[in-house]
Amino acid sequence: MLPAGGATVVFPAATPATAEVPLVQIAPQAPPVSYFPVADTAPQPRVNQTPPLQAPPHAVVQPPAAPAPQAAPIPTAYRRPLLPKRTGTIASAGLALVMAATSAPYIGFLVLAAVVVLLRIVGTFANDWHTRRELAGYARGNDSAMVAARAPVTLIRALIGALPQLLVGLFTGLILLAGGWWALGSSQVMAALGLAPQVQAARAPASGWLAAALLLAMAGAMLMTWFGTHSALTRYGARVALAKVAPGQAARAVVVAISLLLAAYFVYSALGAGAAPINWWPATNPPPIL
């Protein structure tokens, strides 16, 4: 639509193409604000920020409570003392007894029987005394009185227990004595020993061969009595007795020395130049097997 009255319309001049257009700088935009917390990737150590508890100024400090009374200690299991075996001392005493049998065989075996019974009684009493404490778990003041009150029963048990030992030893000695006596009268055995012409002389009471046979029989009887059936309490009684009679080294040396001297004396009495005849007391004659 043109203006009325023929008016002239003037348009603004166009901007030349070569004119520079001013650059508008755009400010960097800030990162968007997040309203949700983002967890850190690296774990942070936790610090205990709880302040220490403090008693308020008006609090009353209570004194420490008295310790509770302790209960009586529980008794420990009782263990009987271990006693040494005294092998050397017992062996020297046994050697003296074996040598004594070459001069008086019956007396030697009776002494062996008396020693076995005595040691059996000692071992039985000591075993009962320690057994009471082992069953209770601790030592009690009336243990000795209770064991003494049962003394008659203990004596009977000791005698019955020693009987199998002595019977085994007795029959072992008789068998060895009979075998040795047969060997002395056998021309084959004596010929093997180079003593065939002395068969009759070997059985003479004054000869040393009979003493050797008695020595062999007594040694076998003693070994079977000491280590045979039902002999543990007898050996235990020997350890208990030696612990009381000869506790120290000097006392044991005296017992060994006396035993060796007695053994040497009996050997000289049986095999020496002036050997005495064999004493068969309490019998008047040797056993029928001789």
Image (cartoon, grey):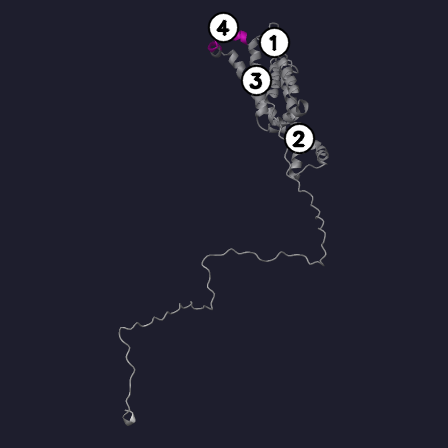
- Residue furthest out toward the bottom: 5
- Whether 3 is drawn above or below 274: the answer is below
Residue type beneath disc 4: Pro
- Which residue in the structure is indicated by mark 3? 217
Question: Can you tell which of label 4 and label 1 is closer to the viewer?
Answer: 1
- Mark 1 nearby-residue class (10 Å; few <14, some 14–19, many ≥20): some
Residue 155 occupies which quadrant of the picture? top right
Question: Can you tell which of label 4 and label 3 is closer to the viewer?
Answer: 3
CA gap, disc 2 to disc 1? Answer: 39 Å
How far from the left and from the top, in percent, is residue 127?
65, 32
- Which residue in the structure is indicated by mark 4? 197
Residue type beneath disc 3: Ala
Q: How many marks?
A: 4
Q: Which residues are magenta?
A: 190-202
- Mark 2 nearby-residue class (10 Å; few <14, some 14–19, many ≥20): some
CA gap, disc 2 to disc 3? Answer: 32 Å
- Whether 185 is drawn above or below 77: the answer is above
Question: Can you tell which of label 4 and label 2 is closer to the viewer?
Answer: 2
- Whether 136 is drawn above or below 2: the answer is above
Tag shown at residue 268: 1
Look at the numbered discs 2 and 1 and tell me whether their residues touch, using CB distance below 8 Å: no
Residue at image point 71% right, 31% down: 151
How far from the left and from the top, in percent, is residue 14?
28, 79
